[in-house]
Amino acid sequence: MKNPYEVLRMKEQEMLRVRKEMDALRIAARLLGAEDPGAANGEGQPKLQRVVEMP
């Protein structure tokens, strides 16, 4: 049987990794939008939304 504290620690580490990846993707999306000539007019640029985190 797995130790519940070890499983919790692993899940928390995985959540931190995913959050970092999401932040990196948000930055990349902004940079790519800045390179798009239609981005100045707001054309073709998706609206980014924040995800509500549950406790």
Image (tube, rainbow, N blue to C red):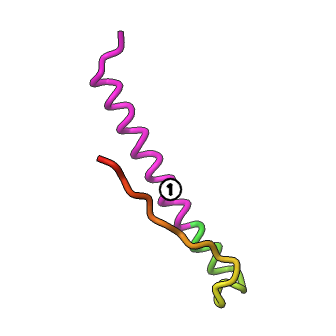
Q: In the figure, 51 relative to 18: above or below?
A: below
Numbered marks: total? 1
Dot 1 lies on which element? helix
Name the residue at 36% across, 53% down.
53
Q: Which residue is mark 1?
A: 22
- Left or right placement of residue 24 versus residue 35 in this view: left
Q: In the figure, 42 relative to 18: above or below?
A: below
**Farthest-out residue, top:** 1
Residue 49 x %, y %: 49, 67
Q: In the figure, 40 relative to 13: above or below?
A: below
Q: Quadrant of the N terminus?
A: top left
Q: Quadrant of residue 37?
A: bottom right
Queried whether the magenta region covers residue 8, the answer comes back as: yes
Residue 2 x %, y %: 35, 14
Q: Main secondary structure of the magenta part?
A: helix
Name the residue at 66% across, 90% down.
41
Name the residue at 32% across, 30% down.
8
Queried whether the magenta region covers residue 20, the answer comes back as: yes
- Left or right placement of residue 30 versus residue 23 in this view: right
**What amino acid is found at the position of numbered circle 1 in the picture?**
Met
Q: Which residues are magenta?
A: 1-27
- Left or right placement of residue 52 versus residue 29 in this view: left
Q: Quadrant of residue 42?
A: bottom right
Mark 1 nearby-residue class (10 Å; few <14, some 14–19, many ≥20): few
- Left or right placement of residue 44 versus residue 12 in this view: right
**Farthest-out residue, bottom:** 41
Residue 50 x %, y %: 44, 64
